[in-house]
Amino acid sequence: MRLLIVEDERELAESLRRGLTAEGYTVDVAHDGNAGLELALSEGYQAIILDLMLPQLNGYQVCARLRDARVGTPVLVLTAKDGEYDEAEALDTGADDYLTKPFSYVVLLARVRALLRRGGEPRPALLKVGDLVVDQARRVCSRGPTPITLTAKQFSVLACLARRANTVVSKGEILDEVWDAAYEGDLNIVEVYIRALRRSIDVPFGLVSIETIRGAGYRLVDARA
């Protein structure tokens, strides 16, 4: 597995490189936004660890340009910026996960493994299930010509189902893919988001596209009336 670290703190970047290399990963390092973006666009990485406060291009800009270029490589933001609006902006520009400094190296490894499980292969930007369109790069969706407004977490749950359309996805798989490794809450939180999704993507259109498979999970299918 090949990883890219974009981090301007050279000692931290080198420490991460050594640690991840010891775990068996192949690791490249860039120390500014321009160099990181160039590598991310030209090389095939399975995941990117991205600082926000970078020289030249900041991390938000790097992430946004990757998604504009339809590069779906999973991005873990690693930053000292710990405000909720900073995290929201990073996720809205296309990041997949967010970890603040100082951080636990054990948790970092777990987050990287989670990203690789759900995004180790290139992801198509547009997912279509019938007339439902899920744009992973822009993190928006629509049914036919009608845009649908979702929260960031609702979108992530929908994208998880859309990537495996017509296949049963368990609650555990959804939780593992959408919630971070530190989540220790109730597994039934998934049901809450499934109900919210149905109210947004199905009910207003008089359709059913998210099926409940009793004892197994959920399946996203071409909608029926």
Image: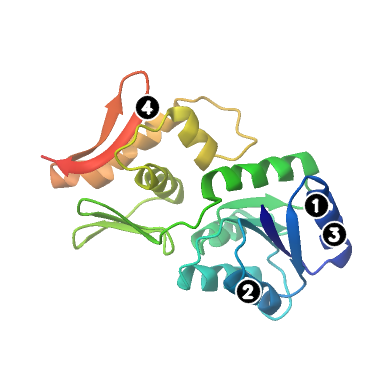
Instruction: Nearest to the eye among marks 3 and 2: give it.
Output: 2
Instruction: Give the residue furthest to the top.
Output: 215
Q: Which mark is residue 21?
A: 1
Look at the picture and state if 195 lies above or below 80: above
Q: Is residue 181 left or right of residue 152?
A: right
Residue type at mark 3 is: Leu
Task: State the residue at coordinates (57%, 61%).
Answer: 90
Q: Residue 209 at x, y = what percent?
A: 23, 40
Look at the picture and state if 57 lies above or below 2: below
Q: Which mark is residue 12?
A: 3
Secondary structure type for disc 2:
helix
| Neighbourhood count class around disc 1 (C-alpha, 10 Å): few under 14, some 14–19, many 20 upward | some
Q: Residue 186 at x, y = what percent?
A: 52, 24
Name the N-terminal-most of marks 1 and 2: 1
Instruction: Give the residue furthest to the left.
Output: 225
| Neighbourhood count class around disc 2 (C-alpha, 10 Å): few under 14, some 14–19, many 20 upward | some
Residue type at mark 2 is: Leu
Residue 86 seen in render: yes
Task: State the residue at coordinates (68%, 58%).
Answer: 3
Secondary structure type for disc 3:
helix
Secondary structure type for disc 1:
helix
Name the N-terminal-most of marks 4 and 1: 1
State yes or no: discs 4 and 3 in contact (Cβ < 8 Å).
no
State yes or no: discs 1 and 2 in contact (Cβ < 8 Å).
no
In the picture of the structure, the residue carrying the numbered disc 2 is 37
CA separation, marks 4 and 2?
Answer: 38 Å
Secondary structure type for disc 4:
strand
In the picture of the structure, the residue carrying the numbered disc 4 is 217
Residue type at mark 1 is: Thr
Instruction: Nearest to the eye among marks 1 and 2: give it.
Output: 1
Residue 195 lies in quadrant: top left
